[in-house]
C-alpha cells in the first residue's frame, strides 16, 4: 500500500514487532528449550507445522539392456536394485507422519510387483531404454498420480552399490 506521496507504507504493528523481536532474540541467544512455548504466545494463525520426511527402502531384481549405450550395458544383464521412497507430511497426534507399513504396502502393490523379476525393456513406459533415471521418474510419478495417502517427495533408484538416480519432481 502507498501513502499520499507514493511511498510504500510499512504496515508495522505491535504484534509484528513482537513476533520479529521474539524470534530474533531466540535466534541470537540460541535458547535451549521448547520454542513451541514461544509459538503459543504469538497466536495460532502465525504457527506452521513442521514438515517431516519418512523414507522406506526396498529391493527388487530386474534385467535390462540399453540399446543406445555403446558399452557392456548394451547387452542383457541384471541388477539387484535398491529403491528409496521418501514421503513428507505432518505428524499426527501420535507423532507419526505415515506408518512405514502403509508405505511398504503401496510401494509393493504399485511398483515392486510390476518391476520385480522382469526384463524392464518389456515395460512400455521405458521405451526400450530403461535407465535408472527413467525408473526414478516413473516410480515418483506413479506413486504421486494414484489415489493413495502418500506425498512422495523423492525417489532414489540404486542400480549398483555406488550408482543411483534421484528424482524429486523438480523441473529446470
Image (cartoon, grey):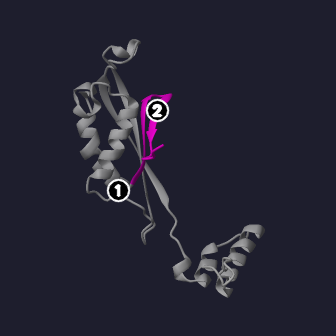
Q: Give me the residue at 68% from left, 87% from top.
A: 14
Q: Where residue 141 sits: x, y (%)?
A: 33, 46
For the residues labelled 1 and 2, the Cα–Cα distance comes to: 22 Å
Residue most extreme to the front: 5
- On residue 150, the disc is 1
Residue nearest the viewer, comparing 46 with 163: 46
Secondary-structure class at tag 1: loop
Taking 157 as reference, is 152 above or below it?
below
Secondary-structure class at tag 2: strand
| Quadrant of res 40 | bottom right
Q: Residues within 10 Å of mark 1 (few under 14, many from 20)?
A: some
Q: Give me the residue at 30% from left, 22% from top.
A: 64
Q: Give me the residue at 67% from left, 72% from top.
A: 33
| Quadrant of res 155 | top left
Residue most extreme to the bottom: 14
| Dominant SS in magenta | strand
Q: Report the residue marked by disc 2.
A: 164
Taking 113 as reference, is 78 above or below it?
above
Mark count? 2
Which region of the structure is painted magenta? 152-172
N-terminal label among 1 and 2: 1
Residue most extreme to the right: 29
- On residue 159, the disc is none
Left or right: where 147 falls relative to 97: left
Left or right: where 128 falls relative to 45: left
Amino acid at each position: 500500500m502507498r501513502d499520499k506521496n507514493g511511498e510504500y507504507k510499512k504496515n508495522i504493528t505491535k504484534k509484528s514487532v513482537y513476533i520479529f523481536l521474539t524470534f530474533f532474540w531466540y535466534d541470537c541467544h540460541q535458547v535451549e528449550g521448547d520454542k513451541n512455548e514461544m509459538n503459543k504466545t504469538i497466536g495460532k494463525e502465525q504457527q506452521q507445522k513442521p514438515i517431516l520426511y519418512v523414507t522406506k527402502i526396498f529391493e527388487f531384481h530386474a534385467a535390462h539392456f540399453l540399446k543406445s549405450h555403446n558399452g557392456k550395458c548394451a547387452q542383457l544383464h541384471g541388477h539387484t536394485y535398491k529403491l528409496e521412497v521418501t514421503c513428507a507430511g505432518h505428524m499426527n497426534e501420535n507423532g507419526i507422519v505415515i506408518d512405514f507399513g502403509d508405505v511398504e504396502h503401496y510401494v509393493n502393490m504399485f511398483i515392486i510387483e510390476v518391476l520385480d523379476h522382469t526384463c524392464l525393456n518389456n515395460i512400455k513406459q521405458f521405451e526400450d531404454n530403461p535407465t535408472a533415471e527413467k525408473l526414478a521418474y516413473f516410480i515418483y510419478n506413479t506413486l504421486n498420480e494414484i489415489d493413495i495417502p502418500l506425498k512422495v517427495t523423492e525417489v532414489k533408484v540404486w542400480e549398483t552399490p555406488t550408482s543411483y538416480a534421484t528424482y524429486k519432481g523438480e523441473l529446470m
